[in-house]
Amino acid sequence: MILVLWTVVTAAFIGIAEGHRHHRRGGGATELEAFHYAAAGAGGNRAHVARLTDFGGVGDGVTSNTAAFAAAVANLSKVAYDGGAMLVVPAGRWLTGPFNLANHFTLFLDHDAVILATQDINKWSIIDPLPSYGRGRDAAGGRYSNLIMGYNLTDVVITGNNGTIDGQGETWWKMFRNKELNYTRGYLIELMYCKQVLISNITLVNSPSWNVHPVYSSQVIVSGITILAPVNSPNTDGINPDSSSNVRIEDCYIVSGDDCIAIKSGWDEYGIAFNMSSKHIVIRRLTCISPTSAVIALGSEMSGGIQDVRAEDITAINSESGVRIKTTIGRGAYVKDIFHPDDNFDPKAIPVVRNITYSDVVAENVTMAAKLEGIPGAPFTGICIYNVTAEVVKSKKPIWNCTDVEGVSSHVTPTPCAQIPEYPDRITHCPFPEDDLPVDCVGLEECSYWRTNP
Ligand SMILES: *[C@@H]1O[C@H](CO)[C@@H](O)[C@H](O)[C@H]1NC(C)=O
Ligand SMILES: *[C@@H]1O[C@H](CO)[C@@H](O)[C@H](O)[C@H]1NC(C)=O
Ligand SMILES: *[C@@H]1O[C@H](CO)[C@@H](O)[C@H](O)[C@H]1NC(C)=O
Ligand SMILES: *[C@@H]1O[C@H](CO)[C@@H](O)[C@H](O)[C@H]1NC(C)=O
Ligand SMILES: *[C@@H]1O[C@H](CO)[C@@H](O)[C@H](O)[C@H]1NC(C)=O
Ligand SMILES: *[C@@H]1O[C@H](CO)[C@@H](O)[C@H](O)[C@H]1NC(C)=O
Ligand SMILES: *[C@@H]1O[C@H](CO)[C@@H](O)[C@H](O)[C@H]1NC(C)=O
Ligand SMILES: *[C@@H]1O[C@H](CO)[C@@H](O)[C@H](O)[C@H]1NC(C)=O
Ligand SMILES: *[C@@H]1O[C@H](CO)[C@@H](O)[C@H](O)[C@H]1NC(C)=O
Ligand SMILES: *[C@@H]1O[C@H](CO)[C@@H](O)[C@H](O)[C@H]1NC(C)=O
């Protein structure tokens, strides 16, 4: 089963800047810089290895390990430029509040290691809103810190022998539903202004909100992770690349209460001013169960633009829609879509959505084939759908819901909406880029590639 999606989406004020990029193996030229991922698996290639217990950690599920994590990271960050370090979290249940990561650092979770997020809300400090959003999602003002936070780091690995990070989100979901929260919920893992990130071989459960949030980051690989949350839990998106580039998501299994993958780039005038798009994103071999949301969503916050997203080998089970593209102008739509813009949004800031390709898709047990919602007066154009079969279950929703979109299709079942008419004889394929992305050239075992400087 293959889903191929190629999209170019940018805000009108930003223009279609097809990022010029090139890569090659070998390096050497001044604008190219080699980097190495720590090898996957125990030890990696870090020179220094320590265990959480070396810093007073107690894995009894009751004792707080916030200080132990902080001490470990402070200690190990000193050897960041002396071969880097790995912190091993052994089997056990390690209760903790939020903690930070370090440069050239690996957090390794043994099998049967569980990092348990504290449910004591006072242990989650308040941090600034993201500059490309200007406010929190749940409430105005700041936001709660994230459980595991990387800020302005290079070469960060979170991996393990399928150990678990448990957000214990039930208390947060309850407070969110009861409108008791004064700030936006934290994410399980946030990497902000980071590059060379690998998240692999771990299981994330019950995040208070989003699970993995790379923001203003690049060269991010998420490989072989499992994300589980109740399908009715609020905003438990799986992986949300946000104003990030060269992101590769592969071999992941996600069951969540919101989108499995949501690609974003900031909100309204803050996103436009911050002007950092999400681009060069590869998603492959993803299995997603998302009964109320999308397998892959673009937006709705996309003021910095989204371009060049490629998805292949996607399995969607019992999900609302395979792909949802949603963006908006003005206030009314934002209110409808959870966001509450302040008074400074620019009603003339109309995103441009173009050239979206879906081919070779098989979807089972979905409630809609596609929801393609363009903008009145600024339709999404250049949509091409080829060789797609969706087994749609009976629901109140329309099988295709197309508004303000234009395109062509062929060999599609069920018959697409009138806006994407079928030309079975004329359309024999849809365009798809044939070049590799730099992030495609990273071998997790090989551990190096060369990239263009940002
Ligand atoms: C956003 O950045 C692009 C280049 O990446 C530039 O062409 C464009 O003018 C910028 N837009 C704004 C609103 O600053
Ligand atoms: C994941 O774990 C498997 C087996 O435990 C190992 O072979 C593989 O290299 C790991 N992959 C990554 C990306 O960490
Ligand atoms: C912290 O690091 C120093 C050297 O960098 C080392 O000597 C010391 O043992 C470490 N502390 C712990 C608790 O491991
Ligand atoms: C990141 O760290 C470097 C120094 O290591 C500093 O110059 C830069 O301002 C920092 N960037 C941010 C966004 O904090
Ligand atoms: C990792 O653990 C999760 C949760 O127990 C499980 O569903 C998943 O299959 C495991 N993944 C691997 C590769 O063993
Ligand atoms: C939110 O603020 C109100 C008023 O200051 C306070 O009573 C309440 O405890 C706060 N809620 C949380 C979850 O901190
Ligand atoms: C969209 O596709 C058309 C036809 O394939 C091409 O001419 C155009 O350059 C594409 N636009 C963008 C923004 O990629
Ligand atoms: C249509 O897609 C299926 C996979 O979903 C693939 O096996 C098949 O080869 C495709 N057919 C054509 C004509 O491309
Ligand atoms: C389809 O989805 C429904 C609703 O979640 C579920 O009850 C049913 O078991 C699914 N059927 C199949 C064949 O997966
Ligand atoms: C189609 O989507 C639009 C926009 O979200 C919505 O207003 C409309 O009700 C939907 N149509 C149907 C028939 O559900």
Image (cartoon, rainbow, N blue to C red):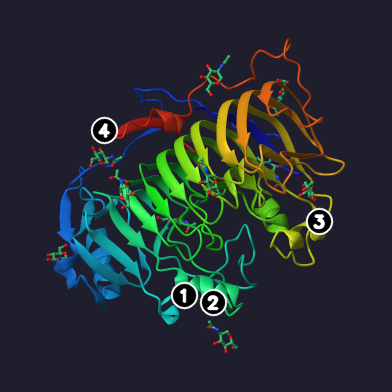
Disc 3/disc 1 C-alpha distance (Å): 34 Å
* Residue placed furthest toward the top: 425
Residue under label 4 = 445
Asked if residue 30 can be seen in this view, the reply is no
Disc 2 CB within 8 Å of nearest ligand 6 atom: yes
Q: Position of residue 342 (x, y in %)?
A: 75, 67
Disc 4 CB within 8 Å of nearest ligand 2 atom: yes
Amino acid carrying mark 1 in the image: Thr
Q: Residue 171 has which mark?
A: 1
User: Going by the image, does 111 lie left or right of 407?
Assistant: left
Disc 2/disc 4 C-alpha distance (Å): 43 Å
3 or 4: tag closer to the N-terminus: 3
Asked if residue 435 can be seen in this view, the reply is yes
Q: Position of residue 224 (x, y in %)?
A: 35, 42
Residue under label 3 = 330
3 or 1: tag closer to the N-terminus: 1
